[in-house]
Amino acid sequence: MSAQSEQLLLRQTQLNALARLPRQLARLAATVDEHELTTPFLAGEWSVAQNLHHLADSHMNSFLRCKLILTEEEPTLKPYNQDRWAALADSQTAAVHSSLALLHGLHTRWMDFWNALEENDWQRAGLHPEIGRVTLATLLRIYGAHGAAHLLQIRQTLAAQYHTLPATPAELLARVDREWTRLQTLLAELDSSTLESPIDGGWSPKLHLAHLTLWENYLLRHLVGGEAAHLLFQLDPGSDPLAQIDTINAADEARSQQLPLDVVLEEAQRVHAAVRAALLTLEWPEWVRPGADGAPPVNGLIANSYEHYLEHWHSLLAA
């Protein structure tokens, strides 16, 4: 592939990221309650609401800079203090629908702007007092990645609400239910074709779900049920499955790829229901008592349930 072709492909990837961001944010916001929206679970970081309002503020500023660059000769681009903006009352409210609506309309206009550029327009520039000369190509690169960075920040913020171990089986189950519901809400919006289509060249939503089911089954049959892990994964006796995760995941991917969608969906619901029932029967003191390595066994339950769901719904937003 020529350098020019690579540049055009990269540019299109950046444009695609900008085009789909408003829908991603709207889908995410639909899974987050008011407490999660407004609580800064990570010290020194913004809340989910502040992240969403910031994206509207930031992209408004960038859109105006783009138009100034295209219509004036190297205009001065006015900076703004994003932290002070995020501290304002309107940036902390849980009423994020206005910012989501703004982003939808703004990105529609912005995509019209980008798609109308001539090739020589991409090198037109403005002068930013803090970072110097900035071209339209640079702005696309920056803002093509900006949304993804904040989606990751939001996932980390939501995960931080679980920084301490659950104190009771009921609290563990509440966390499992909250994150499972978030995951299922995102999946429910997808039609069968989208569920089976690769996301950015990677796993399809179907394969993400099958992968989660694989490790929920490990939780159910090995961690809680005591079944030998090597039998569960068809490994050599004495094998440590955690040392062979890539091999196990690849084998399950190949298996799941061949399964009909309805079988994967049914298996996911069946195994999850069994996991949920098993969690209700836990002898809690045994699970929170430190083991030989100093870590309580409940860590394994967490890693293969709500922490795992949190990791994967982030990928589903791009479907």
Image (cartoon, grey):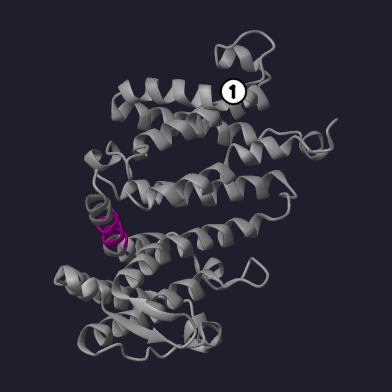
Task: Tell me where the magenta segment starts and ends, as one range.
Answer: 10-17
| Residue drawn at (31%, 21%) of the image | 258
Q: Secondary structure at mark 1?
A: helix
The residue sitting at 24% across, 43% down in the picture is: 1
Q: State the image coordinates of residue 67 (x, y, percent, origin top left).
A: 24, 84
Quarter-wise, where is residue 205 in the image? Answer: top left
Kindly identify the residue that appears in the image at 20 percent across and 88 percent down.
71
Compared with 144, 262 (above or below) is above
**Residue lying furthest top in this view?**
237
| Position in image of residue 273 (x %, y %) | 50, 34
Location of mark 1 (residue): 244
Give the overall secondary structure of the magenta segment: helix
Residue 307 placement (x, y as % from top left): 59, 45
The image shows residue 157 at horizontal and vertical percentages of 58, 62
Kind of residue at disc 1: Gln
Q: Pick the residue in front: 120 or 293.
A: 120
Please tell me which residue lies in front, 62 or 283: 62
- Asked whether, in this view, residue 31 is left or right of residue 319, the answer is right
Between residues 239 and 38, which one lies in front from this camera angle?
Answer: 239
* In this picture, residue 208 sits left or right of residue 281: left
| Nearest the eye: 109 or 220 | 109
- Mark 1 crowdedness (10 Å alpha carbons): few <14, some 14-19, many ≥20: few
Vertical arrangement, residue 159 with respect to residue 46, above or below: above
